[in-house]
Amino acid sequence: MTGSWSLARSVERIERLCASTLGERDLRVGIVAELRRSLGFDAYAWLLTDPVTSVGSNPVAEVPALSALPTVIKLKYSSPINRWTTFAGPPHPVRLLSRTAADPLDPWRAMLTGYGIVDVASTVCRDRHGTWAFLDLWRDGTSGPFTDDEVAVLVAAGSTITTAVRRRLAGTFLAPAASVPRDEGPAVLILDDALCITGQTVAATAWLQRLLPTTPGMAPIPAAAYNVAAQLIAVEAGADDHPASARTHVPGFTWVTVRASRLAASGTSGPGAIAVSIEETPGAERRDVYARSHAFSPREHRLVRLLARGLDTHELAEAMSISDYTVGDHLKSIFARTGLNSRHAVLTAALGASTEPPA
């Protein structure tokens, strides 16, 4: 068993990683490596999430069988066992499968048992601005269940990790972006209820490769499509009520929204297939993630929304029932949070397109 002193040192190393200049994905990889060294685990899944819908995308993961990935994701979303959307209590609670009283025949638990998994430590990166990620660490019978001291590491580091992930996502709004090809056409995938892909457009293949790049010659892993489709099935089964959509950043490109919906059934008594679309996130929805990731206050968020309408300082003051001086104070706070120094720069970053400077 790892000593308490050693575990405390692990928290310190995680905090140093979070304070580093590592990019978002490298940060997660580094934290996983530290947790593997200090806690030990046999498989894991760490997904970023839409801050509002809590639906996952952009995974860093090692699962027992990649071919079983659609089933793993579907069962994870449909099971009530330690579902990340239900976490409450401390700011960064950790729940253990080994200490959760649940039906042993639950398909998610049965699947884990089939892989020899005896414990899963689950935690969520959530703050008052949204849900940013969830993490599962899996242990098999050779490692045994997680201890209280090991859980304490995840709890102690939770706030720091959450803030670091949110700030890395905020940084994507200023990252240089390649232009998105406009002639690819709609990006759509068709899946059945087992999450098997039965068809997809050329544009969908291109976006999947951008979302989760693979080595040349390998087909892209459609993790984002699996997650929103699994959420749709979970909603239909009453396991959750969040929309089956996720806004996610495509490294080197832009923010996109991945969304699942049912096609109308055709000549059968069963449900229609699942259609998953991938499209650039509209300005208003992108602005929402921008404000949340930069930890704007509700009033700052509203001010940016009004800025997008082209209001000048006095009009902003009237619309918000505050003084011109208070508008200036809010703008200074926004500039400090974003590292920008003009209204035009803030709107360009928030909306993702060149914007005429407000009057």
Image (cartoon, grey):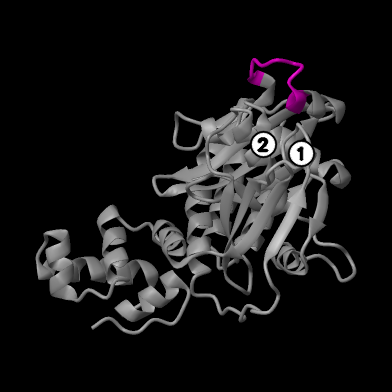
- Left/right of residue 267 with respect to residue 312 in the rendered view: right
**Which numbered marker is on residue 141?**
none
> Image point 37% across, 74% down: which residue?
347
Labels 2 and 1: the sequence-earlier one: 1
Q: Is residue 102 magenta?
A: yes
Q: Is residue 62 left or right of residue 97?
A: right
What is the x, y in percent for residue 352? Answer: 48, 74
Which residue is labeled 1 in the image?
193
Point out the image quarter for the N terminus: top right
Q: Are marks 2 and 1 in contact (CB under 8 Å)?
A: yes
Q: Which residues are magenta?
A: 99-109
Residue 286 can be seen in this image:
yes
Q: Nearer the viewer, residue 195 or 224?
A: 195
Residue at x 81%, y 65% (from the top left corner): 214
Vertical placement of residue 275 versus 283, above or below = above
Measured as percent of width and height from the top left, residue 46 is found at 66, 47
Q: Is residue 327 above or below residue 1?
A: below
Find numbered disc 2 in the image and state the secondary structure of the residue it sits on.
helix
| Residue sitting at x 73%, y 40% | 73
- In the image as oriented, which residue stretches furthest toward the right? 217
Amino acid type of the residue tagged 1 in the rendering: Asp
Please rate how many residues cluster around mark 2, counting C-alpha atoms within 10 Å: few if below 14, some from 14 to 19, many from 20.
many
Q: CA distance from mark 2 to mark 1?
A: 8 Å
Q: Secondary structure at mark 1?
A: loop
The tag on residue 233 is: 2
- Residue 181, image quadrant: bottom right
- Which residue type does callout 2 highlight? Ile
- The reply to whether residue 37 is in sight is no
Q: Give the vertical position of 92 relative to 291 (above or below).
A: above
